[in-house]
Amino acid sequence: MSPTPHTASKHHAGRDVAIQIGARVLNLALGVVVTVLLARALGDEGFGEWSTVLVVVQLAAYFTSFGVESVVVREAAADPEREDEWLGALLLLRALLSVPAVIVGLVVVLLIQDNTSMLVAGLVLLAQTPFNVGASLRVVHQLRVRNWFPMIVLTINSVLWAAAVVAIYVGGGGVVELAVAMTVIGAFTATLQAVAAVRIAKPHLRPSREATMKLARVGLPVGISGLLVLAYARIDQVLVFAIAGPAEAGLYGAEYRIVEQAHLVPISLMTTLLPILSGAWPRDRERTMRIAWRSAEYLAAASLGGLAVALAVAEPITVLLYGEDFAAAAPALPVLGGAFVFICFGYLTGNLILIAGLQRRLIAIGLVGLVVNVVGNLALVPPWGFMGAAWMTLATEAAVVGTSAVILARAVGLGRPDLRRLARILAAAAILAAALVGLDAAGLPLGAVLAIAAIGYPALVVSVGGIGVAELRSLVRERGAALAE
């Protein structure tokens, strides 16, 4: 019998996170390869067009989910006896939302398209929207703390997509061929995910009006806020394309893609923690916050380490991945690396707000982010191009996390973090950055510099007392206790 958030053991939960991280690291590697091939095959202008149309389709596709998946996880984890109804309500709402999603996507693609190929690619990508309904059943595996299967599906998708990109790259194809390949692969893996989920749980295909209306009512503010988050996170790509042109959009998109791949760290952690924290919150809020602060420390360690690497070797990394034609994009990587630090904390604060039942506040937070981002980009992109967009991404993420923290502190209290441990993590990252700058200046090959960072940084964090083995074990014990109750 599959475990639930209430019955899973601490070993199962820890293994679940480890499997996710391992799978996402593999997918990260494949994603980097794919991005490199795309950038080199399409050039800066072609890559700018592809990145922009992909962002538009992603924004439209969000209408099919509108944040209801996270609400289903929260409700089903707290009320497992009605899981089938929550799943049925999820499918019904997502099917209904697919219609406006396709319409909105079509309108936006028509407005932003720059040529026939860009238009056709956008229309083809929109064709996969209905398949996202079945893919939403991945929440079944999340509720069972069996996230390894969605990771298998993700990996299959990544492998097939990488193979398709290689074939298109060798064959000299363009954005239309890429769109066809992505749509076919996405439809296949979404179907695979849905079939596997139905074998575990049977959604009630005629959910009660009560469950459907509650999901819609609770999901509406979550969905609006999620759309706002997606909008402020990716609208800058569209603005750079519209204001500064496809070449600048290509440079910005290349560096943003590197940071985007790094989202595997907070996603892996929060995918497992959301149902666990949701189950623990009504029983022991103090324990919930302890788990949250432990998670914050690990997010800080991972994101600050990435920032240190970006500060030290941004240009060598950019040239290695994309070639000399993209070297001008390198200054954006450290700035976006700084934004990623706040992005990591944003995953945590956003989920805590949802768990605490403050989902309506998410709309205000999203509006803050959108206003700051759009106004800032309109002011900075004309004179500064893609660098203006990079700085506004950093400013936006900082504003969003700051607003979220204030809301949580006033509504439920956040407790007190261990500032000494956080300071030690920051010191370890600073030492790493200084060391990498010196190694790069000494002429050490980039591969060796990155290997030293990957091996030395974790040891450095532990040695300065930022994170210890005892804390790692404590987090696992806390997670197991929250699951068991």
Image: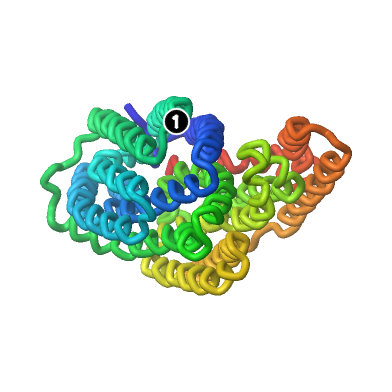
121 shown above or below 381: above
Colour theme:
rainbow
Position of residue 106 in the picture relative to residue 168 (left or right):
left
Residue 276 showing in the rendered view: yes
x and y percent of residue 175 in the render? 40, 41
Please tell me whether mark 1 sits on a helix, a strand or a loop. Answer: loop
Q: Residues within 10 Å of mark 1 (few under 14, many from 20)?
A: few
Pick out the residue farthest to the right: 442
- Residue beneath disc 1: 172
x and y percent of residue 201 in the render? 24, 34
36 shown above or below 52: above
x and y percent of residue 168 in the render? 42, 29
Amino acid bearing label 1: Gly
The quarter of the rendered structure image containing the N terminus is top left
Residue at point 82%, 40% (across, down): 440
Residue at point 55%, 66% (across, down): 396
Residue 455 sits in which quadrant? top right
Residue 109 sits in which quadrant? bottom left
Q: Residue 117 or 455: which is nearer the viewer?
A: 117
Residue at point 53%, 34% (across, down): 37
Residue 353 showing in the rendered view: no
